[in-house]
Amino acid sequence: MKWGTLDMQSRTSLVKREILKTIFRSVGWVSIVYFLGLFFAIPLDIIMNSSEEQRKFLDIDNLFQYNFQLQYIFNISVPVILSVFLFRFTQVKQYSDLMHSLPVKRASIFHQYALTGIMLLILPVLLIALIVLMLYQPMNLQEFYSIGEIFNWVGITLLLNIVIYLAGVSVGMLTGLSAVQGALTYIFLLLPVGLIILVSINLPFYLFGYPDQYYMASKFEKFSPLIALTQMNMRTPSSAEAAIYLFLILTLYYLGLQIYKRRRMEAVSQALVFPVTKPIFKYSVTFCTMLLGGGYFGEMRGGISWLIAGYLFGALIGYAAAEMVLQKSWRVTINMKGLMAYTALMAALFILFQFDFTQYEKNIPRGNEIERVHFSESFYLYSDIDHEEPLYLKEYENIDLVRRFHETIVKDENRLAEIPGRDSVFIVYELKNGEKLVRDYRINKKEYKPFLKLIYESDEYKKATNEIYQVSADATTKLTITPNGPVTKRAVITDDKDLKEAIEVLTEEVDSASFEELQGSDEPYAHIEIFYNDSNKAYMPWYPSYSRFEEWLEEKSLLNEARVNSNDISYALAAKAKDIDVNFAAGYSYEEVFEEMRDSKSAVKLTDKNQIESSLKNSDGFMDGDYIIAFYFDEQRTIDIKSFTEKTVPVFIKERLQ
Amino acid sequence: MIKIRNVRKSFDEMDAVENVSIKVNKGSIYGLLGSNGAGKTTLLKLLAGIYAEDEGSVAIAGQPVFENPVIKEKIFFIQDHPYFLPQYTVKQMAQFYQNIYSRWDDGRFEELAAIFEMDMHKKIHRFSKGFQRQAAFILALSARPEVLILDEPMDGLDPVMRKKVKSLLIDEVAEREMTILISSHNLREVEDLCDFIGIMHKGRMILEKDLDDLKTDTHKIQVAFKGSAPAIFDSLRILHKEKRGSVILCIVKGDAKEISSYVEQFKPVIFDMLPLTLEEIFIYEMGDIGYAVQNILG
């Protein structure tokens, strides 16, 4: 009797022992494979690299860094595989009928399956953590990381795994095919990031000045657990992120449960179980592939007809693919009415954007609203400068210049949108109310020279863009001038008085440098590095136009060391570009060109020092001129090749090549 | 015991079951007949609590079935192709059901397994189709359900096994008043088992009959008279009549005694009252619903 009552209790309890058993029997292997995978990736790696010799080369400060790729593959695949196999009973008709004829409520089935699944994910991770904890002391792992890192690893791995797993579970409740469940889960997890990218590559076609790179680089990787996981060896997520993942876990669990409760079991083996989701799926896929098609053809800059063709092509492919999935056949019938409605809506949207209905393009903040403005030639100058603050202009005059420049560009929209320029203008207004307005344009700098000249020659811009202004002459310890060319010599100044003078001269040079000089169309003679305040270093190029500096170096007898001159060159070969039999388009090496010139009868050899000096000064750094000149550097037996145009070619070369 | 009222269930806007009502009394065996796609399986799955009805109500012992474990514990559903948990043996399946169905009877299970000579430790999916079906019966009956729902249960069973299963079912019904709902596309398969049948066609219930009534109610008579036949037929309920020479053959409804005493009055030369097969009854009684009935007569 005693047994009987016990038995009764277990029967009425919420957890059915046999259901747990069947779960372990069907998906236990996933957990075991996961454990083995992690065991290979972490504890085994620790043990195998335990000798003193190997440890020297180990560069590890958290658990993710052990075979990160392997861990990553397991972390993104195991949860999805688990969710697919675990809920197999919702995707196979007979299995579904069996499970749902049992006297167990759906909620109870869901809780038992979903929670056991979570347990199967947690167990291997905890076991691995336990093993690493046991290895911690004997293997002296404290030399690499603290014990906390183990718990960190457990926490991050579990959070992300469970998010991915529950995404798989929730998606599974919407579909009646295991394959679709797997595929849709990954699409779902990538969707936030994918949409940002798709929209960002398309908006520039509609919104003149839309800074796509700016939005695409804005840390969107956090929006997808799959992509966030790729960075876990480098960074630890903030507690806010962890809270969001936790929130996602709860939401996805609740969603999965609610959808499962409402799921119609007769729809097993259909791609999507709920009829409402079918059009949503169909048109979302169509929309995404449309953006992809348009983005692809649009990037090729083939003009608006190609853009539209890209949209049509993408939309049709997406629509057909979605129908194929839904109808489970490649011979699909197309619902013309729906497709027409979609086309009409997209056309309306397209036209609306043509009229700039959001006033995005004309939106330029008023001068008194602006706190400061970033103005540069590339988004990367704004974002990528090793955590240094990007350049900002704060003076009203300069802000106004940028604004007026901006206005002019907007006025020229029609022309610029048609034939985009080769140069980029990147503007970030930081407004007094804390908002930001970011624009990116492609123009030809030449056409806007008056504006650019005023901005670039302003004191504020120069001070912000030239490091030399940060150098205090008193604290400077060394200045090196490294010639631009294949030579090993360099000039070094360490004398206090000389340093002061040099910095003074260089500052004056920059002060008085014109827009044209600063644009650096001339190849610099040398690169100057200034060491100051113990650890700081300022850098600047020495342009040929800085003639006062050249004079000063001459005075100090440093000129010979400071730049390449005829002394470094034993001889030079010159020829007309068209006489040299080198296919420049197919790629070439300096050696090839040089040999070709040496063997060619149409090339001349220069050995006169003065002629070489003059050739050096007048030639350009690229091999795109009418005359080619190759310099042979004795010291390292290297070659440098430059060119002249019809205008810059020295007379003595031109004459000999007649 | 079972009460289905005005039930509708549609798949993708197509009605699979439309306005169907049936009532099954405790301890009776109800045969649900119909050709493929008539909606039998859908109706059974509604009754088993697998599907939720779109309209109407499905109740057992006065309570709705869907999402109601208390009621579902009293039901056992065997699918048209019996299905078992992947890689399970009969023994493991038994343990599974034992944990799920509180009325499970282990003694009964051992007993049935012995009768059917079932290998308990072999994986069920390795069994032949017939053996799988037997296993399903054993497991179902061991769960001691009050309502047993069988979808095309005789498929894949040889005649000997059919007999065994049928007698087992009848015993169970007699012994503890189990109610059985059984679907089939073949009348002959179930006519000796059911006491009540319903015929479905295109999602609708087109006919419901008490078989005992039907059999005692319909008769085939052969009569012959000297000379021309008297006008006796006007007052009989005649379903069908034909003449072969001087012999008149007809199908008549009504009480056997009343009919024979009535006919005797006219002093027929020949008068035979013959039993009808169920098949004949259907052909004569429902000639107009033709197609559906023809089909189920197989």
Image: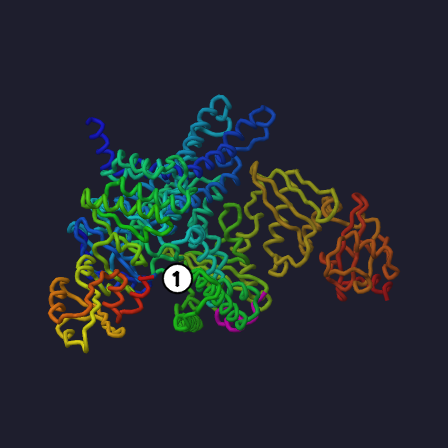
Residue B41 visible to an observer of this rendering? no
Residue A305 in the figure: left or right of residue B27: right
Residue B78 visible to an observer of this rendering? yes
Residue B66, percent from left and from top: 23, 51
Q: Residues within 10 Å of mark 1 (few under 14, many from 20)?
A: few
Prevailing secondary structure of the magenta residues: helix
Residue A347, percent from left and from top: 43, 73
Residue B142, percent from left and from top: 27, 39
Residue A632 in the figure: left or right of residue B160: right
In this view, the residue farthest toward the right is A601
User: Camera-side residue: B9 or A360?
Assistant: B9
User: Camera-side residue: A43 or A504?
Assistant: A43
The image shows residue A137, relative to residue B149, as above or below, that is: above
Residue at the disc numbered 1: A368
- The magenta stretch is A408-421
User: Camera-side residue: A437 or A170?
Assistant: A170
Identify the image quadrant of the C terminus of chain A.
Answer: bottom right
In this view, the residue farthest toward the top is A138
Amino acid type indicated by mark 1:
Asn
The image shows residue A261, relative to residue B225, as above or below, that is: above
In this view, the residue farthest toward the bottom is B228
User: Camera-side residue: A511 or B229?
Assistant: B229
Residue A540, percent from left and from top: 62, 49
Q: Is residue A419 magenta?
A: yes
Residue A527 in the figure: left or right of residue B1: right
Q: Is residue A448 magenta?
A: no
Identify the image quadrant of the N terminus of chain A.
Answer: top left
**Chain to which the residue tagged by mark 1 belongs:** A
